[in-house]
Image (tube, rainbow, N blue to C red):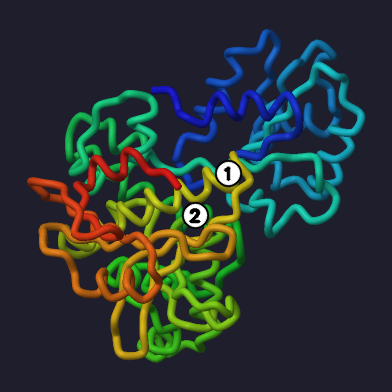
Amino acid sequence: MERSQKKIIQSDLQKKIVFLVGPRQVGKTWLAKDIAQSNKNALYLNYDSKEDRDIIHSESWLETTDLLILDELHKMDGWKNYLKGIYDTRPNNLQILVTGSARLDISRYVGDSLLGRFYLHRLLPFSPQEFAEIKHEFSLLDLIERSGFPEPYLSKNEQDVRRWRNNYIDGLVRFDVLEYENIQEIRYFKLILDMLRERVGSPISFNAIAEEMKKSPNTVKRYIQIMEDLYIIFKITPFSKMISRSILKQPKIYFYDTGMVKGDMGKKFENLVAISLQKYMYELIDQKGEHVRIHYLRTKDGREIDFAFLHNGELDRMIEVKYNDAHIDKNVLYFSEKYSLPATQIVMNLKRERKINNLVDLREAKEYLSNLHL
């Protein structure tokens, strides 16, 4: 099944280095090799392979190579300067695609040495919008229960889905996390991860978790930051005109794998919507250079709306998520009036879409998420 980002990545490869990052087992290597089929002399090298590692160190690929795919390159000491040297001295026909773990996230790890030499593409699980773009029929319930990761979504039976998820979670903790940072008390890391699985969509207090775990708030923050760095979770912070104030307030946590969410269908559905919006935000940033952020809205008296898009620093739209409720939430009306902005209530099971007034509408989830746009 072709990924929707393939063509734009191929276009970007003709201009600069492309970094392809994203969660474990989301299909980065598969997509890289799929792209390679369009080149006459593509070469895939994985730094985990001793034979490939020797070729990388000695730069001994053929001069006719027209696409060089470097997987797990971040494990090489001095990889940024190495890559800069390869790029600056490459022949005109050589394209460079670098894939691997979240350590390749440019905003945190690359620094000055590669500025102006790369494009970043974040590959996330399949979403309703991506399925619509590639014209693939899909089930919203399957996306909620199995997630948009290719293997569990395409699996033929639920037993294999459960086995995949157990191996996925085990691999995250035993390999990715320990490789990323030397955590002495991995048991506590797993306990915090399990806590977050039960608290999806609720504001998270680092101090409360720290008190439950008998650990310092800084340790809890560090563990949660590692989960975010490795594309296990992502945070949605409350909106504030002062961004620093927003960061200090309690974030909400969502998982890239909806199957990791523990709770009722409403909570899992909200997580799916969050992933779909997060993926859409990254596409606007990575592919179109837009300045977009997602927050949630909350007042001191407890009024709340699930998601709000900021476009160029200004609130653009608001989104509330309901699994069954076809009656408009009073907070949707409140925030729409307060900010004079469009608001949408997305409902999983909705018989009839309709407008409430000039700014507020009720939308069926599959239709709305398949056609996201600013």
Mark sitting on residue 350: none
Q: On screen, 77 above or below 8?
A: below
**Residue at 58% across, 80% down:** 242
Q: Amino acid at mark 2?
A: Tyr
Q: Amino acid at mark 1?
A: Val
Q: Is residue 162 something that shows in the picture? A: no
- Taking the image as shown, residue 198 lies to the left or right of residue 315, namely left
- Taking the image as shown, residue 159 lies to the left or right of residue 15, namely left
Q: Badge 1 local density, few (<14 within 10 Å), some, or many (20+)?
A: many
Foreground of the two, 210 or 91: 91
Q: Which residue is mark 1?
A: 21
Q: Verify CB contact (< 8 Å) between mark 1 and mark 2.
A: yes
Q: Is residue 345 something that shows in the picture? A: yes
Q: On screen, 337 above or below 43?
A: below
Picture coordinates of residue 50 (x, y %)?
Answer: 70, 33
**Residue at 45% across, 28% down:** 3
Label 1, label 2: how many angstroms apart (C-alpha)?
9 Å
Picture coordinates of residue 74 (x, y %)?
Answer: 70, 47
Q: Quadrant of residue 156?
A: top left
Q: Quadrant of residue 347?
A: bottom left
Picture coordinates of residue 247 (x, y %)?
Answer: 54, 78
Q: Which residue is mark 2?
A: 231
Residue that lies at the very extreme toward the front in this rendered image: 358
Residue that lies at the very extreme toward the top in this rendered image: 40
Residue that lies at the very extreme toward the right in this rendered image: 89
**Residue at 20% across, 53% down:** 355
Picture coordinates of residue 309 (x, y %)?
Answer: 45, 60
- Taking the image as shown, residue 33 lies to the left or right of residue 368, namely right
Q: Earlier in the sequence, mark 1 or mark 2?
A: 1
User: The N terminus appears in which quarter of the rendering?
Assistant: top left
